[in-house]
Image (cartoon, helix red, strand yellow):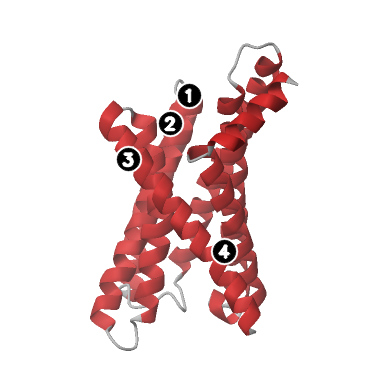
Amino acid sequence: MSAFLESFVGVGFLAFFIASSVVGVRLLLLWWRTRELPELLIGLGVLGIGPVGFGFITVGELCVAGAPGLARILIGTGLAAMSLGSGAKYVFNWRVYHPESRGLRTLVVIACLLLAFCLAWEYWDTGFRTLVRPPRSYFLRIGLQVGCLLWGSGEALRYWDRMRRRVRLLLADPVVSNRFLLWGLGAGAAGVGSAVGGFMQCFTQLPPIELPWVMLSSSLHGLAAAVAMWLAFVPNARYTRWIRARAEA
Protein backbone atom coordinates (compact mmCIF):
# COMPACT_ATOMS: atom_id res chain seq x y z
CA MET A 1 0.00 0.00 0.00
CA SER A 2 1.44 3.36 -1.04
CA ALA A 3 2.08 6.12 1.46
CA PHE A 4 -0.66 8.26 -0.09
CA LEU A 5 -3.19 5.43 0.12
CA GLU A 6 -2.20 4.70 3.71
CA SER A 7 -2.73 8.36 4.62
CA PHE A 8 -6.13 8.42 2.89
CA VAL A 9 -7.20 5.22 4.63
CA GLY A 10 -6.03 6.66 7.95
CA VAL A 11 -8.14 9.79 7.47
CA GLY A 12 -11.30 7.72 6.94
CA PHE A 13 -10.71 5.54 9.99
CA LEU A 14 -9.80 8.54 12.16
CA ALA A 15 -12.92 10.44 11.09
CA PHE A 16 -15.11 7.44 11.93
CA PHE A 17 -13.39 6.98 15.29
CA ILE A 18 -13.82 10.64 16.29
CA ALA A 19 -17.40 10.98 15.04
CA SER A 20 -18.63 7.76 16.63
CA SER A 21 -16.88 8.61 19.92
CA VAL A 22 -18.42 12.08 20.15
CA VAL A 23 -21.88 10.94 19.04
CA GLY A 24 -21.88 7.89 21.30
CA VAL A 25 -20.83 9.84 24.40
CA ARG A 26 -23.36 12.61 23.68
CA LEU A 27 -26.16 10.06 23.38
CA LEU A 28 -25.22 8.36 26.65
CA LEU A 29 -25.08 11.74 28.40
CA LEU A 30 -28.52 12.50 26.96
CA TRP A 31 -29.77 9.17 28.28
CA TRP A 32 -28.34 10.02 31.71
CA ARG A 33 -30.60 13.09 31.75
CA THR A 34 -33.73 11.66 30.13
CA ARG A 35 -33.49 7.96 31.09
CA GLU A 36 -35.08 7.15 27.72
CA LEU A 37 -34.28 3.71 26.30
CA PRO A 38 -33.63 4.75 22.64
CA GLU A 39 -30.78 7.10 23.60
CA LEU A 40 -29.16 4.36 25.69
CA LEU A 41 -29.49 1.71 22.98
CA ILE A 42 -28.18 3.79 20.10
CA GLY A 43 -25.39 5.22 22.26
CA LEU A 44 -24.25 1.71 23.20
CA GLY A 45 -24.54 0.67 19.57
CA VAL A 46 -22.44 3.52 18.23
CA LEU A 47 -19.73 3.20 20.90
CA GLY A 48 -19.72 -0.59 20.98
CA ILE A 49 -19.30 -1.20 17.26
CA GLY A 50 -17.20 1.91 16.65
CA PRO A 51 -14.47 3.30 18.92
CA VAL A 52 -14.59 0.74 21.74
CA GLY A 53 -14.99 -2.41 19.67
CA PHE A 54 -13.00 -1.48 16.59
CA GLY A 55 -10.49 0.59 18.57
CA PHE A 56 -9.67 -2.05 21.19
CA ILE A 57 -9.36 -4.81 18.58
CA THR A 58 -7.04 -2.69 16.42
CA VAL A 59 -4.76 -1.81 19.36
CA GLY A 60 -4.89 -5.42 20.54
CA GLU A 61 -3.69 -6.73 17.19
CA LEU A 62 -0.75 -4.31 17.36
CA CYS A 63 0.18 -5.75 20.78
CA VAL A 64 0.07 -9.43 19.76
CA ALA A 65 3.82 -9.78 19.16
CA GLY A 66 5.13 -7.67 22.05
CA ALA A 67 2.47 -8.10 24.74
CA PRO A 68 0.28 -11.15 24.05
CA GLY A 69 -1.42 -11.02 27.45
CA LEU A 70 -2.50 -7.41 26.97
CA ALA A 71 -3.53 -8.24 23.40
CA ARG A 72 -5.93 -10.93 24.61
CA ILE A 73 -7.54 -8.52 27.07
CA LEU A 74 -7.94 -5.79 24.43
CA ILE A 75 -9.23 -8.11 21.72
CA GLY A 76 -11.65 -9.81 24.09
CA THR A 77 -12.94 -6.47 25.36
CA GLY A 78 -13.32 -5.18 21.80
CA LEU A 79 -15.24 -8.28 20.70
CA ALA A 80 -17.51 -8.05 23.75
CA ALA A 81 -18.16 -4.36 22.99
CA MET A 82 -19.00 -5.15 19.37
CA SER A 83 -21.39 -7.88 20.45
CA LEU A 84 -23.05 -5.57 23.00
CA GLY A 85 -23.30 -2.77 20.42
CA SER A 86 -24.82 -5.02 17.78
CA GLY A 87 -27.32 -6.41 20.29
CA ALA A 88 -28.27 -2.89 21.37
CA LYS A 89 -28.92 -1.91 17.76
CA TYR A 90 -31.14 -4.95 17.24
CA VAL A 91 -33.19 -4.00 20.29
CA PHE A 92 -33.29 -0.35 19.13
CA ASN A 93 -34.63 -1.33 15.70
CA TRP A 94 -37.37 -3.41 17.25
CA ARG A 95 -38.39 -1.09 20.11
CA VAL A 96 -38.34 2.15 18.09
CA TYR A 97 -39.88 1.02 14.80
CA HIS A 98 -41.95 -2.12 15.59
CA PRO A 99 -42.53 -2.31 19.36
CA GLU A 100 -45.73 -4.34 18.98
CA SER A 101 -44.26 -7.04 16.72
CA ARG A 102 -43.85 -10.34 18.53
CA GLY A 103 -42.15 -11.89 15.51
CA LEU A 104 -39.42 -9.25 15.46
CA ARG A 105 -39.05 -9.51 19.21
CA THR A 106 -38.33 -13.22 18.80
CA LEU A 107 -35.89 -12.44 15.97
CA VAL A 108 -34.06 -9.92 18.16
CA VAL A 109 -33.81 -12.38 21.05
CA ILE A 110 -32.35 -15.01 18.72
CA ALA A 111 -29.86 -12.50 17.28
CA CYS A 112 -28.69 -11.46 20.76
CA LEU A 113 -28.29 -15.09 21.84
CA LEU A 114 -26.26 -15.80 18.69
CA LEU A 115 -24.02 -12.80 19.41
CA ALA A 116 -23.32 -14.16 22.90
CA PHE A 117 -22.73 -17.62 21.43
CA CYS A 118 -20.25 -16.21 18.87
CA LEU A 119 -18.30 -14.45 21.61
CA ALA A 120 -18.01 -17.68 23.61
CA TRP A 121 -17.13 -19.62 20.44
CA GLU A 122 -14.36 -17.17 19.53
CA TYR A 123 -12.89 -17.49 23.02
CA TRP A 124 -13.02 -21.27 22.75
CA ASP A 125 -11.34 -21.28 19.31
CA THR A 126 -8.67 -18.61 19.76
CA GLY A 127 -8.63 -17.49 23.39
CA PHE A 128 -8.84 -13.95 21.92
CA ARG A 129 -5.14 -14.26 20.99
CA THR A 130 -5.59 -12.76 17.52
CA LEU A 131 -8.15 -12.21 14.74
CA VAL A 132 -5.64 -12.21 11.89
CA ARG A 133 -6.83 -15.74 11.05
CA PRO A 134 -10.34 -15.53 12.49
CA PRO A 135 -12.45 -18.57 13.43
CA ARG A 136 -15.74 -19.42 11.73
CA SER A 137 -17.63 -17.74 14.55
CA TYR A 138 -16.09 -14.43 13.47
CA PHE A 139 -17.95 -14.52 10.16
CA LEU A 140 -21.25 -15.38 11.82
CA ARG A 141 -20.79 -12.40 14.14
CA ILE A 142 -19.96 -10.13 11.19
CA GLY A 143 -23.14 -11.31 9.48
CA LEU A 144 -25.16 -10.43 12.58
CA GLN A 145 -23.43 -7.05 12.79
CA VAL A 146 -24.17 -6.27 9.15
CA GLY A 147 -27.75 -7.38 9.69
CA CYS A 148 -28.45 -4.92 12.52
CA LEU A 149 -26.85 -2.04 10.58
CA LEU A 150 -28.68 -2.64 7.31
CA TRP A 151 -31.97 -3.29 9.08
CA GLY A 152 -31.60 -0.03 10.97
CA SER A 153 -30.69 1.78 7.74
CA GLY A 154 -33.77 0.49 5.96
CA GLU A 155 -36.09 1.42 8.83
CA ALA A 156 -34.63 4.93 9.12
CA LEU A 157 -34.93 5.58 5.38
CA ARG A 158 -38.49 4.26 5.35
CA TYR A 159 -39.40 6.56 8.24
CA TRP A 160 -37.65 9.49 6.52
CA ASP A 161 -39.78 8.94 3.43
CA ARG A 162 -42.94 9.15 5.56
CA MET A 163 -41.75 12.26 7.38
CA ARG A 164 -40.71 13.94 4.12
CA ARG A 165 -44.33 13.91 2.99
CA ARG A 166 -45.40 15.42 6.31
CA VAL A 167 -42.77 18.16 5.96
CA ARG A 168 -44.37 19.21 2.68
CA LEU A 169 -47.64 19.67 4.56
CA LEU A 170 -45.88 21.58 7.39
CA LEU A 171 -46.73 18.76 9.78
CA ALA A 172 -43.14 17.75 10.66
CA ASP A 173 -39.82 19.39 11.44
CA PRO A 174 -37.51 19.28 8.39
CA VAL A 175 -34.39 19.03 10.58
CA VAL A 176 -35.75 15.97 12.40
CA SER A 177 -36.76 14.45 9.07
CA ASN A 178 -33.26 15.03 7.71
CA ARG A 179 -31.76 13.28 10.73
CA PHE A 180 -33.59 10.09 9.80
CA LEU A 181 -32.15 10.36 6.28
CA LEU A 182 -28.64 10.90 7.61
CA TRP A 183 -28.92 8.09 10.14
CA GLY A 184 -30.16 5.73 7.42
CA LEU A 185 -27.30 6.65 5.10
CA GLY A 186 -24.70 6.42 7.88
CA ALA A 187 -25.88 3.03 9.14
CA GLY A 188 -26.09 1.79 5.56
CA ALA A 189 -22.53 2.89 4.80
CA ALA A 190 -21.24 1.19 7.94
CA GLY A 191 -23.17 -1.98 7.10
CA VAL A 192 -21.93 -2.17 3.51
CA GLY A 193 -18.35 -1.50 4.60
CA SER A 194 -18.55 -4.29 7.19
CA ALA A 195 -20.10 -6.64 4.65
CA VAL A 196 -17.36 -6.02 2.06
CA GLY A 197 -14.58 -6.50 4.60
CA GLY A 198 -16.13 -9.60 6.17
CA PHE A 199 -16.92 -11.27 2.83
CA MET A 200 -13.45 -10.69 1.41
CA GLN A 201 -11.77 -11.90 4.58
CA CYS A 202 -13.93 -15.03 4.41
CA PHE A 203 -13.21 -15.52 0.69
CA THR A 204 -9.46 -14.90 0.80
CA GLN A 205 -8.68 -16.02 4.38
CA LEU A 206 -6.45 -12.95 4.61
CA PRO A 207 -6.64 -10.11 7.15
CA PRO A 208 -7.92 -6.77 5.77
CA ILE A 209 -4.51 -5.13 6.18
CA GLU A 210 -3.21 -7.46 3.44
CA LEU A 211 -6.00 -6.38 1.08
CA PRO A 212 -5.38 -2.69 0.21
CA TRP A 213 -8.58 -2.13 -1.74
CA VAL A 214 -10.60 -3.65 1.11
CA MET A 215 -8.92 -1.22 3.51
CA LEU A 216 -9.75 1.61 1.11
CA SER A 217 -13.38 0.46 0.91
CA SER A 218 -13.66 0.28 4.70
CA SER A 219 -12.10 3.74 5.03
CA LEU A 220 -14.46 5.32 2.48
CA HIS A 221 -17.53 3.72 4.04
CA GLY A 222 -16.31 4.77 7.48
CA LEU A 223 -15.81 8.33 6.28
CA ALA A 224 -19.33 8.43 4.80
CA ALA A 225 -20.78 7.05 8.04
CA ALA A 226 -18.80 9.61 10.08
CA VAL A 227 -20.05 12.58 8.05
CA ALA A 228 -23.64 11.36 8.21
CA MET A 229 -23.50 10.73 11.98
CA TRP A 230 -21.92 14.11 12.64
CA LEU A 231 -24.51 16.03 10.65
CA ALA A 232 -27.33 14.02 12.22
CA PHE A 233 -26.30 14.42 15.87
CA VAL A 234 -23.83 17.34 15.97
CA PRO A 235 -25.05 19.66 13.18
CA ASN A 236 -23.87 23.26 13.04
CA ALA A 237 -26.26 26.18 12.74
CA ARG A 238 -25.43 26.81 9.09
CA TYR A 239 -26.43 23.28 8.11
CA THR A 240 -29.74 23.37 9.99
CA ARG A 241 -30.56 26.77 8.47
CA TRP A 242 -29.87 25.33 5.04
CA ILE A 243 -32.19 22.37 5.69
CA ARG A 244 -35.00 24.69 6.90
CA ALA A 245 -34.50 27.03 3.93
CA ARG A 246 -34.79 24.13 1.50
CA ALA A 247 -38.00 22.99 3.19
CA GLU A 248 -39.50 26.48 3.05
CA ALA A 249 -38.55 26.84 -0.62
What element does badge 2 sit on? Answer: helix
Q: Amino acid at mark 3?
A: Leu
- Residue linked to disc 3: 28
Q: Is residue 84 above or below residue 103?
A: below
Counting residues from the N terminus, which is met first, the one under dot 4 or under dot 1? 4
Q: Amino acid at mark 4?
A: Gly
What element does badge 4 sit on? Answer: helix
Q: CA distance from mark 1 to mark 3?
A: 26 Å
Q: Position of residue 32 (x, y in %)?
A: 26, 34
Counting residues from the N terminus, which is met first, the one under dot 1 or under dot 3? 3
Q: CA distance from mark 4 to mark 1?
A: 37 Å
Task: Point out the image quarter for the N terminus.
Answer: bottom right
Q: Amino acid at mark 2?
A: Arg
- Lateral position of residue 99 relative to residue 162, left or right: left
Point out which mark residue 183 bears. Answer: none
Point out which mark residue 12 bears. Answer: 4
Point out which mark residue 101 bears. Answer: 1
Q: Which is more toward the observer, 84 or 213?
A: 213
Q: Which quadrant of the structure image shows residue 165? A: top right
Q: CA distance from mark 4 to mark 2?
A: 35 Å
Circles 1 and 2, Cβ within 8 Å, touching? The answer is: yes
